[in-house]
Image (tube, rainbow, N blue to C red):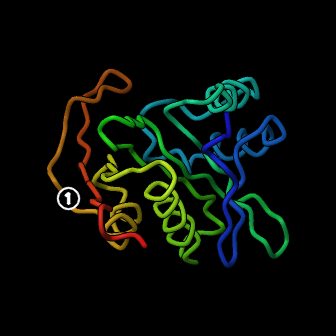
Amino acid sequence: MKPIFTDLETERLILKNISPDDRDFIFRQFSDEAVCRFLFDAEPLTEIGGADKIIESYLQPEPRTHCRWILIEKNGGEKIGTCGFHRWNAWESYCEAGYDLFPDFWGRGYMTEAMSEAIRFARAEMLIKTIGAVIYPDNLKSVRLAEKLGFVHKGETKDEIFRGETYEHKIYTLDIKERVK
């Protein structure tokens, strides 16, 4: 079976499929308080073994319902973040997007560039028609990114529980049936 999730490329970035070689980067990324501030589904990593578990979850054989790319700057080769899809339902042509960027690279347009290519890939290769995003309301950078990419606010949910508390998330969707070339 030909892998569906291939490496991608943009003007400034390589989007490389996650691999065991990314262990140190994944640990650095997901142990950083600024990166994890709005990721309310898991505590920041405190041990390198947590990075192994994250990588292992994305290395399941295809077909699988999720993919994560490591964002690598072409100029310098530095790993700067991740993006990808989860909850892929091929029958409903739906998936959810997730993304994170190391703080040193915020505000440079990298995630807009990476997610634009990922969305193109979702339409062309995954045959996705709708992409969802679940965003914590105080994560204004993520809200702005989603809106810039064409996601539309559809409502809120309060059914997520983390650290014993219920918290709100904004629900966004992107209809890409005709939007992506």
Residue placed most toward the observer, 1 or 88: 1
* Residue displayed at 35% across by 64% down: 146
Left or right side of 147 for 157: left
Q: Is residue 90 above or below residue 177?
A: above
Q: Determine which quarter of the picture holds residue 57.
A: top right
**Residue 46 screen position, x and y as percent:** 68, 29
**Residue 159 screen position, x and y as percent:** 21, 29
Left or right side of 158 for 89: right
- In this view of the protein, can residue 135 be seen by the observer? no
Q: Residue furthest front?
A: 1
Instruction: Name the quadrant of the C terminus.
Output: bottom left
Q: Is residue 168 above or below residue 111?
A: above
**How many numbered circles does the render carry?**
1
**Residue 2 screen position, x and y as percent:** 68, 40
* Residue displayed at 26% across by 36% down: 167
Q: Residue furthest left?
A: 155
- In this view of the protein, can residue 170 be seen by the observer? yes
* Residue displayed at 27% across by 59% down: 175
Q: Determine which quarter of the picture holds residue 81.
A: bottom right
Residue placed most toward the observer, 109 or 107: 109
Categorize mark 1 by other alpha carbons within 10 Å: few (<14), some (14-19), many (20+): some
**Residue 122 screen position, x and y as percent:** 47, 54
Kind of residue sitting beneath label 1: His
Instruction: Name the quadrant of the N terminus.
Output: top right
Q: Is residue 25 above or below residue 91?
A: below
Left or right side of 166 for 8: right
Residue corresponding to mark 1 = 153
What is the secondary structure assignment of the residue under circle 1? strand
Q: Is residue 49 above or below residue 106?
A: above
